Structure formats: structure tokens, C-alpha cells
Amino acid sequence: MAGIFWFRLDCGPLGSDPVLVLLPSGGDWPGTSTLVMHNGAERYGAGQVKQISKVELRRLATRKASISLLEQMFAGEIEVYIGYRRLYRYWCGHNSAVEELRPMFSIPNISPDGILSVTDEFNEQIISIAREILTSFRN
């Protein structure tokens, strides 16, 4: 491999090791052969390189986006309904990556893909579930 290489440092979820991502020098990001150098010697050995597939990168991106939305909803930075609909879009598109969201879309008498009545009770219920889901994501 000769040429110029670009790297990006990814911190990942809370409590995880930082990773150094080698960006492909031609082609689409994420590339088919994206390499990640892990800093966690106890898990992978010092300086060992691990290949990550596109599927895994999409899964990680969906999880990261979901966590960000949950945090924004909990902090009141976005409307609960908007966050709920965006999370449902992630759930429909890649539910295996965000199984923790299942309780949010299993609420009795609420159809996430139908007409919703956005009341204070709905908002409180969604925020409460978001708090529980954030806890499970961090564990």
C-alpha cells in the first residue's frame, strides 16, 4: 500500500476504547475494506488491525444516531414526537442494530406508524422509556 493515508479518530460509545479509522483513498466511504486499529490491548493486542464490514459500520452508525436522538429527547433539545418518529425510522430500517428500542414501539394503544395523539402523558411515557433505553445502551 503506497500513497497518502487519511485517518479519523472515533471515540465510540461511552466506556469503549478509542479507535483509529483508516479512510479509503479512493472509492466510497465507508469502503469495503475499512480498517480499524484498536487501542484496547487486552481485547485485540497492541496495535492489531481488525477489518470491519459495511454491515457492521451501518449497525454502529444506526446505534450512534439512536443514542444521540434519545439524549436530545431526554434533554429537551428536540420535540418528543419528532424524536419518536426518527427513532421509528431507524427501527424500521435496522431493528437488529437497535433492539433496545423495542419497548418504545410496543406501547399498548399507540401505533407508531399510525395517527398519534401527542399529549403530555404520551411525552412523559416516551421520555421515561428513553431514559431506560439510554441506560441499557450504556451497559
Image (cartoon, rainbow, N blue to C red):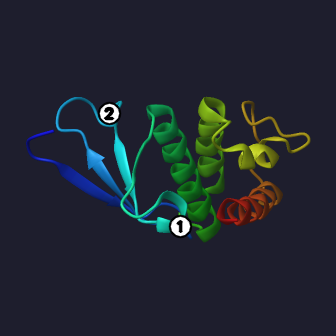
The image quarter containing residue 80 is: bottom right
Residue 86 placement (x, y as % from top left): 58, 43
Residue 131 placement (x, y as % from top left): 73, 65
Q: Foreground residue, 17 or 116? A: 17
**In the image, what residue occupies the spot 56% across and 55% down?**
69
Q: Quadrant of the N terminus?
A: top left
* Residue type indicated by callout 1: Glu
- Say few, some or many: other residues with alpha carbon within 10 Å of mark 1 (under 14 / 14 to 19 / 20 or more): few
The image quarter containing residue 9 is: bottom left
Residue 35 placement (x, y as % from top left): 35, 44
- Say few, some or many: other residues with alpha carbon within 10 Å of mark 2 (under 14 / 14 to 19 / 20 or more): some
* Residue type indicated by callout 2: Gly
For numbered disc 1, what is the local secondary structure? helix
**In the image, what residue occupies the spot 24% across and 54% down?**
7
- How far apart marks 1 and 2 lie (CA) works out to 27 Å
Q: Which residue is mark 2?
A: 31
Tell which residue pokes out farthest to the front in this image: 45
Q: Is residue 101 left or right of residue 32?
A: right
The image quarter containing residue 28 is: top left
Q: Foreground residue, 101 or 35? A: 35
Residue 78 at least partly seen: no
Tell which residue pokes out farthest to the right in this image: 108
Residue 125 at least partly seen: yes
Q: Which of the marked residues, 1 or 2, is nearer the chain's N terminus?
A: 2
The image shows a total of numbered marks equal to 2
Q: Which residue is mark 1?
A: 42
